[in-house]
Image: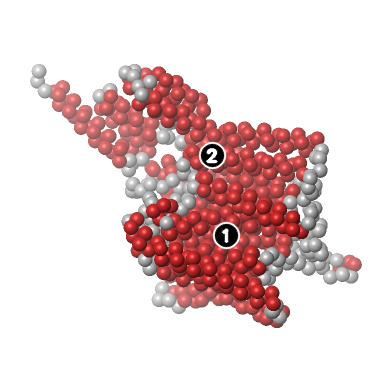
Amino acid sequence: MSRFHASGATSACAVILGGALAGVAFGAAGGTELTRTTTVEVLMVLASAVLIAAGVLWGRRGPLYGATALVLFAALAAFTALSVTWALMPELAYIEAGRTLAYLATFAAALAAARVAPQASPVVLKGVLLAALAAVAYALASRIWPGTLAEHELSNRIGQPFQYWNAVGTTAALAIPAALWLGSRRTGSVLGRSLAYPALGACVLAIMLTQSRGALVAAALGTIAWFAVVPLRLRGLPVLLAGAIGGGAVSAWALSKDAFSKSLQPLSAKESVAGEFGLLVALMVLALLLAGLAVNLGLGRVPPPMRLRRRMGVAAVAVACVVPLLAFTSVAVSDRGLGGTIDDRLDELTSETETAPTEGAGRVTAASSTRGKYWREAGRVFDDRPVVGVGAANFATARLRYRKDATFSRHAHGFIPQTLADLGIVGLVLTTALLLAWLVAALRTTGLHPRRLPSRRHNGEPPPRRDWDGERVAVVALSLVAVVFGLQSAIDWTWFVPGPTAMALVAAGFVAGRGPVPAVASREGTAELPSLRWPPPRPASGRIAAAGAVGVVAVIVAWAIWQPEASDRATNRALELIENRSYQDAIAKTEDAAAANPLSADPLLVRAVAEASAGQESAARRTLERAVLEFPGDRQTWLRLATFQLRTLDRPQDALETVRAVLYLDPFSGEGRQLFLDARARLRQKQAEAAAPG
């Protein structure tokens, strides 16, 4: 294959991968809408099966790198699915099991791709970067055309296309190592390296406009790690400085405007600054592109001497170390002192009453947030079932017993608290083992493990050196993509958002499955690894059978993931039939819904509505009682039964007894409290009527 055709093929593969990951991001959005998320998860599983089957058919022979991490990931997915049997709300655990299986398939597909094309690290990096930039560009564009792209967005913080600002911040943060790689590499076109400058500037701008402190810290740590490890500091420093200055300047202007600094601003306020913001973004992109071209053309014509490179490298590392040191020193000499300041910040972070500023840029430097409240609630949930938890994704239900106000939250805003509440100690042990297994695999692949390289002293030769060729730099960048995502998601719930999670999983899976980069690069770079052959050779019959098994398993998993959506569609159809007074057809449709997903209470609740509408009050009462018995942890089943007892059967005493279960599960339930008062008032009225003479 000629060099031209090879370059075109790799570019096409990068675009295809970027398009697929962008499709996950835009298709699933925030991961909260069942139909969109389920559709994307099914497609993720089926597309991943194709890559896994390709890995089975044509993957290179030898050690199965990343196998330990893959097995532990599968164990975590199995335990998540098993939690359905003890979950407070089995349906939530079932849906979360489907999400975890889709993530497992994505990780396995990336691992398989690394076995087929181990030299494709640059392709994977470009694909991840393209997908992340697509989401970042859309987020910024939503403030240039707010009436078209973000008409109903109430927050001052940009959140499209995920409807969640921290997910946008995370996506921008994980793109920064990829942008640094693109701009500092020795190979590639001048235009390609120059495009890294506006890309990094857009990511910095997006992080600042989301005001996501977790994303900012994760991006900073990833950047420090890049400059500390990769010896391309002179090439990477202009990319970082130019991008930070450009993105920082535009963000400083934006955060001085109410549309970006104050919440609940009307659409007219956002549109009033949209034109200026769009102009500034366009000027930033143009200026950074020109800066990138100037720097790259200058480096190409006049390569800096080795002494200057070393000095600049030392200076870059020194700056990366001095910034936190200065912050450390300023804290130490403050009025509170180091210990007092740290204690004060920890108190703010873990406080149940402190909240971060909602206006202005002060939020970026504040330590306070609502996380402390959710972490404490997760701790109380964990105390109830410390070994196996309350079931995957069931924190949202279990926390209702322990909340001290009527605030709503689906997540514990932290991976460890969420895991402890949902899956207990067993789940935390599995995830910790998975993390450690991946870290070992990543260190082995990058060659950054602490073990010494094999010695040749017995032959009188010095030990081999670690060459920083293009392949090693690329796999380090991919590793940092996954690390940055992991750092941010540790204090948030962004792993529930499929878009950035899929990008991180592709990077993590490829790094784990690729295997070690040779200690000394050959003339071609990585000749020890086999190149991708086309057309591929005919595989052995055993491999064909294994690939077929992968396809069968994928279809079964996709079908299982789809069942909650099938049940939801049947339930909605039943509601339409009730409106049309086709009650028997509606009852039949609820049976179909229950057959598709017997772990959901919704088919029984809708069936009760159909039976009551048809005048079958006894049947409706039995159906509601059945729902309570089968789903005792779901407050809605108790609430619907109590409402039926009071409003339809006029049995306030029975309603009072039933509604106590609602208030036990959720003491701050507004509907439960009102129903309790109504039932008590009706009971007193009936008692008064019974006591009245003749």
Q: Is residue 590 left or right of residue 304?
A: left
| First reached walking from the N terminus: tag 2 or tag 1 | 2
Q: Report the amino acid beneath label 2.
A: Thr
**223 in relation to 585, above or below:** below
Residue annotated with mark 1: 175
- Give the crowd class for mark 2: few <14, some 14-19, many >=20 residues within 10 Å: some
The image shows residue 336 at horizontal and vertical percentages of 41, 73
In this picture the colour scheme is secondary structure
Left or right: where 437 falls relative to 659: right
Give the Cα separation between the discs numbered 2 and 1: 26 Å
Using the image as rendered, state which of residue 148 and residue 312 is in the foreground. Answer: 148
Q: At x 49% / y 69%, what residue is drawn?
A: 283
In the picture, residue 320 is in which quadrant?
bottom right
In this rendering, would 112 be left or right of 146? right
Task: Quadrant for residue 41, please give it.
Answer: top right
Let me know if residue 487 appears in the view.
no
Percent x, y of residue 98:
56, 39
Q: Secondary structure at mark 2?
A: helix
* Residue at 76% over, 34% down: 545
Residue hosting label 2 = 39
| Location of the C terminus (image quadrant) | top left
Q: Residue at x 38, y 63 (%)?
A: 273
Q: Secondary structure at mark 1?
A: helix
Residue 58 locus on image (x, y percent)? 77, 44
Q: Position of residue 456 (x, y in %)?
A: 85, 66
87, above or below 240, in the image:
above
Residue at 45% x, 66% y: name it. Answer: 279
Tell me the quadrant of the picture where the N terminus can be found: bottom right
Q: Is residue 469 something that shows in the picture?
A: yes
